[in-house]
Amino acid sequence: MTSEQAPPDVRETTPAAFALEDVWKSFGGVTALSGASLRLRPREIHALIGENGAGKSTLINIATGVHRPERGRILMHGREVHFATPGAAAEHGVSVVHQERNLVRKFSLAENLLLGRQPLTGGVVSYGKMAAEARPWLERVGLHLDPLAEASSLSPGQAQLLEIAKALSRRCEVLLLDEPTSSITEAEFEHLRVILTELCNGGTSIVFVSHKLEEVYSLCSRITVLRDGRNILNDVPVAAVSQEEIVRAMVGRHIELFAAGGRRNARAGAPRLELRNVSTEFGHRGLDLTIRRGEIVGLYGLVGAGRTELARSIIGLGRITGGEIVVNGKPARIRNPYDALRHHRIGYVSEDRKDEGLILRHSISRNVGITVWQRIERWMGWISDQRTRPSVEPPLQHLNVKMQRISQPAGSLSGGNQQKVSAAKWIAAEAELLIFDEPTVGIDVAAKDAMHRLIVELVENGSAILLISSDLREVVQLADRILVMGDFRLLAEIANSGEYAPISELVMLTITKATRDVEAAAA
């Protein structure tokens, strides 16, 4: 189905709560949008889909006053509006949750939530009132935390929920969500789905950007697909198009999506990494874990379960307070990520690409090459681009990073392409053990498929993988064994058959039982 096949009478006669028409935008001579349009009806949840770099975030930035369009119009209820700033958009009832989190880490949750709207008593901010106002919004998205706790204490997934709570607290008429579920689990998405449905029924119109097509079908009524800044599918019913048609519209060709399963018969080799009775400063106690050569171990749990904190402890970004880490059969004391890579061949693909995964102002080449500099440096530490390229270019090509040139700043790429670069640097390093923490967060269907194929390829070549993901389908698709984590402890180990329905049910039953046991003990 194409945009021309969508029923024109429906689009023309139904009044739009919010619309962008024939929008054009370029950056530095590169065209980001070429006559793109988006039409949002009252009380509708509308999916906006496209590959990384297709123009989705640019369209949202224009809709919310971050950028001004070179051509085109923004309409609310049929009347043209102009947003010079995000504040102007907010005054018109247009709110956004951006793909990249924009929290003030040293401020409290409540301060971030009510920034610019803090309640005053006698002209002074009232922290008591602020906490009281913030708490219901935090709890509404599942953040049962102290409103006055520092935002720096949040995991990336929790930070994303805080951003959603901020947008909800504005009681907006139009809500644009740019990858709001990239770091949350299916269970947490179900909670969010209920919230968004209630908002929609209450009069809010929602644009929902996601690379998870299951979520689109579950939540959205209509869909618009962008490719290279143009509409390919324009305002068509979700029920009228298949997943295959959506993927073809996104990438311009048919993709035979990867199906794991054949690799599972491969035998795992000797242990690459063992945790023996390990405790950490984050609160883990008595953890035992083994990852073997040639296997993928999935680590799954709800936001706040302690998965990322465990990964950070393994590579020296958190203190081990008890037990021991064993690498290739020998006790290891890992002081930092550099030590993890140099002495133990361990790499870590962080889920927080913006603050940890990349140096955004540096070139793509330098970001990927940083892990191989020691291997290729010449006399007096001199490193040439010519020597760097053979190590840097293959993983970038393998992951199909969309870039103009290898020397451009990593920060100039779309969020999904930044994620690919973050992964590429560890692949270039030829690590023997790779910890992937949310490896496909914010990347499109084709890139996700390429990442999955790459992970399996790495394992087939002898690497060991610890896969941390909030996408349970991804874990079931790839992992040989699944470790379920909750409250900073390992709850169970599940042998993975690759059949999603029974495995997902077993995983969620494990988490539910553990939660009930904790609640019973507290009572």
Image: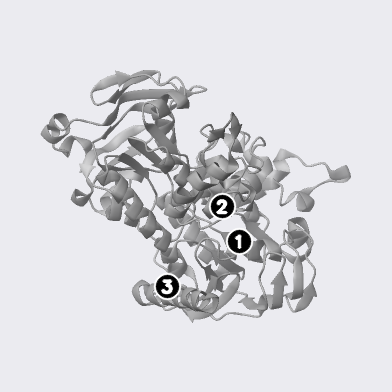
C-beta proximity under 8 Å, tags 2 and 1? yes
What is the image's colouring?
Answer: one colour
Residue 44 position, x and y percent, is: 25, 42
Distance, label 3 to label 1, CA atoms, is 19 Å
Vertical comparison of 346 with 238: above or below = below
C-beta proximity under 8 Å, tags 3 and 2? no
Q: Secondary structure at mark 3?
A: helix
Q: Amino acid at mark 2?
A: Pro
Residue 375 position, x and y percent, is: 77, 53
Binning the other alpha carbons within 10 Å of mark 3 as few (below 14), some (14 to 19) or many (20 upward) gives some
Name the residue tied to disc 1: 308
Q: Secondary structure at mark 1?
A: helix
Name the residue tied to disc 2: 156
| Residue 389, visible in the rendered structure | no
Task: From the viewer's perspective, tell me whether residue 23 is left or right of residue 290.
Answer: left
Binning the other alpha carbons within 10 Å of mark 1 as few (below 14), some (14 to 19) or many (20 upward) gives many
Q: Quadrant of residue 231?
A: top left
Residue at the spot 16% in from the left edge and 38% down from the top edge: 5
- The numbered dot on residue 508 is 3
Task: From the viewer's perspective, tell me whether residue 311 is left or right of residue 41.
Answer: right
Task: From the viewer's perspective, tell me whether residue 324 is left or right of residue 461.
Answer: right
Q: Amino acid at mark 1?
A: Thr
Q: Quadrant of residue 292?
A: bottom right
